[in-house]
Image (cartoon, rainbow, N blue to C red):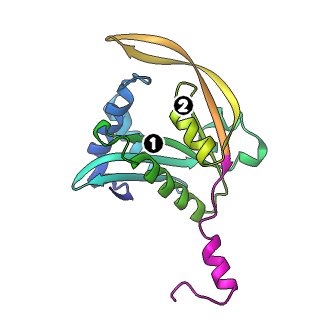
Amino acid sequence: MKIQLFDLTRDLAAIRDLYAACFAEPPWCERFDMNELDAWFTEMTEWPDAIFLVGTEGDRIVAGAIGFNVCRKPGICELIGDTDRNSFYIAELFVDPTYRERGACQKLNEHMLRLASLFGYRRGSVRTSVSQSVIQHVFINKLGFEIVSRQDVVSTKWIDGVEQEVPDTRVIMTGTIRDYLAKQRLLEVRGFHSGH
């Protein structure tokens, strides 16, 4: 899978359709107005703190990842400690069902966190449903994040073709983003330069 920055002209229709399809599945069961998704994705391209990635196989988009400063999500920002109020928020990770369990999500997440580190972020934050044990495992066991808060929400879901208001509990996790420049700085301190 090739990972590249989202290009509004090239990628909008494909990423919008993939996003809507992925989040229409359980446990999310969401429906979206495609014009609203277009507007949201377009707006994000203007945010200086946003990282929007797409994963491609050939000419087909098979995955997406979106992140930005957590303060763009005030409902989450208020639930985390002061040290995490300027953290990089991993907002969305989504993969075509036919490409799941091939490491696509992990690759996108690592690439996004690497870019966030290069942007100067030292802390990360993410929110997911308590039912998403795989996401919690990745962030807690593999990346060292911890659950810092819980949030009770009511989500609109489409179940068996019927719109329903469904209660859910979300967990907010925060943690340190690995310093991807540390090795390069260490080599430079020791007299080596990145071009050698």
Label 2 neighbourhood size at 10 Å, few (<14), some (14-19), many (20+)?
A: few
* Rendering coords of residue 134 (x, y %): 51, 35
Residue 96 sits in quarter: top left
Residues rendered magenta in the picture: 175-196
Marks 2 and 1 sit apart, C-alpha to C-alpha, by: 15 Å
Residue toward you, 187 or 93: 187
Report the residue at 47% width, 41% height from top.
Answer: 92
**159 is higher (above) or lower (below) than 13:** above
Residue picked out by circle 1: 93
Label 1 neighbourhood size at 10 Å, few (<14), some (14-19), many (20+)?
A: many
Evaluate whether residue 154 shows in this view. yes
* Rendering coords of residue 127 (x, y %): 58, 35
Residue toward you, 55 or 16: 55
Where disc 2 sits, the SS reads: helix
Q: Is residue 181 magenta?
A: yes
**196 is higher (above) or lower (below) than 112:** below
Sequence-wise first label, 2 or 1: 1
Q: Amino acid at mark 1?
A: Leu
Left or right for 40, reference 123: left
Instruction: Please state, as top left, top right, bottom left or bottom right, where the N terminus lies in the image.
Output: bottom left
**103 is higher (above) or lower (below) than 130:** below
Q: Which mark is residue 159?
A: none
Q: Amino acid at mark 2?
A: Ser
Residue picked out by circle 2: 133
